[in-house]
Amino acid sequence: MLDLLTVVTYNAVINLAIAVIATVAWWRHPRQTDIVYWLVATWFMVFGAICMSMAEALPYHIMEFTGGTIYVAMTGFMRLGFKEFYGQPHRLREAFYVSGPIFIALALAELLDDPTPVRISLIYLGSAINLALGAEVLWRGKPGEQLPSGRLAAIVFASYAAADVLTAPLALLFPVQFVGRVPVSDWMAYTSMLLLIFNVLAFLMAMVLKLERSGEIQRQLAERDPLTGLLNRRMFLHEARRLAAAAGQTAIAVLDLDHFKAVNDTYGHKGGDDALVQFAERARENLPTGAVFGRLGGEEFGICLPGHDQDAALDVLDRFRDAVAREEIHSDDHRFGLTFSCGFAVMDDPARSLDAWMADADLGLYAAKNAGRNRIVAPRPGMMSPVLEARANGAVPASPEAPRLSA
């Protein structure tokens, strides 16, 4: 048979170990607010467990009020930690939205002949509410982010809440007995062990999610352009090869922002950065689902359109070009226009390499620049020689007769 006081003491010791780990994590990352919330939760957990283990030194009503309220507040801080982790809006006072009313209810229970069973039940129910709200936070997560253990953490919190809900009626059905000033209860000893396991799992899930987020950040640094969030050159080419092999006929485009050096010279590098970021946002808004968009370097970008023939690709790219040309770039108090030139090719011969198709698209880009910029060009046999000659000479030849849009 488990001794309740011994179980609670073990609970305090294990919680202290968790608190020490959380303190070390905070010491290494003091500016991460989610860790601060979890740190507060762990020490609340320790203080609550210590209060509950001091049955021979403290009056039981102090244990109920102090230990119980602190325990409920602890689950509130756990929830806030996950809100901060996922970037969901919150305020510090939310940690006490449940523990505050529970404290009042604990005080009002004094009016009953035997308030202890009701108070114990309220503590379990208050914790269950916070844990259920925490499970909802975990289930929602962060839009666009898929952490492998996010849903598992939500299930752990939901199970933790369910265990508290199922335990709450036991305090009413089988009231805690006292031997002197020491509480004695078989069901509370066993359920405390179960809830301790859930508590350890809850903080373990927080650690796992932090590690997964760190791994995701490292992966994005390796695959994404840090300024725009687009695929970098290596990953864009990798995705283009994969899509071309899977989708068959696929359009590949190379585009370059027009007169971008003038943007940097006129509005500074911040203006240039703002232009790149807002250009990337417009690409996300205007390119179709399934399109792959990447930054190849500087002001040069690549677009891969799986399943698009020449007419379909031209339509998509020209609508995108028009959308960019119609909207101004905002940088501090400055407003300025932005256009791009683009060349594209349709990869319809699996025997040719991606590099060869990219070279064709690049020829179209040079032709678009030559034709006056702000246009889309697919390379044609007649344009190859002048473009290649111009590239060999290090210049783009003039061609005023070229149409605004070619295919």
Image (cartoon, helix red, strand yellow):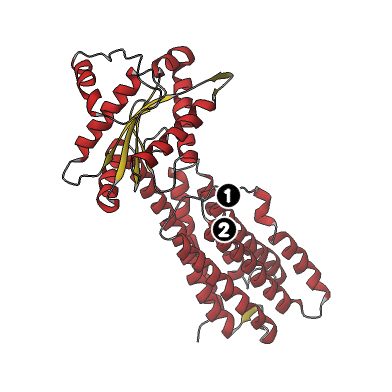
Q: Quadrant of residue 264?
A: top left
Q: Return the x and y of residue 260 as percentages of the image width and height.
A: 40, 19
Q: Nearer the viewer, residue 176 or 361?
A: 361
Q: Nearer the viewer, residue 377 or 176?
A: 377
Q: Residue at x 44, y 61 (%)?
A: 204
- First in sequence, mark 1 or 2: give its number: 1
Q: Nearer the viewer, residue 32 or 283?
A: 283
**Residue 350 visible in the snapshot:** yes
Q: Residue at x 59, y 53 (%)?
A: 80
Would you say 145 lies left or right of 333 here?
A: left
How many labels sit on residues? 2
Would you say 45 lies left or right of 291 here?
A: right
- Which kind of residue does numbered mark 2 sit on? Val
**Residue corresponding to mark 2:** 137
Q: Which mark is residue 88?
A: 1
Q: Residue at x 64, y 59 (%)?
A: 73
Q: CA distance from mark 1 to mark 2?
A: 8 Å
Are the residues at dot 1 and dot 2 in contact (C-beta closer than 8 Å)?
Answer: yes
Q: Residue at x 20, y 44 (%)?
A: 349
How would you rate the neighbour count of disc 2 (Cα within 10 Å): few for under 14, some for 14-19, many for 20 or more?
many
Q: Secondary structure at mark 2?
A: helix
Above or below, 365 against 82 in this view is: above
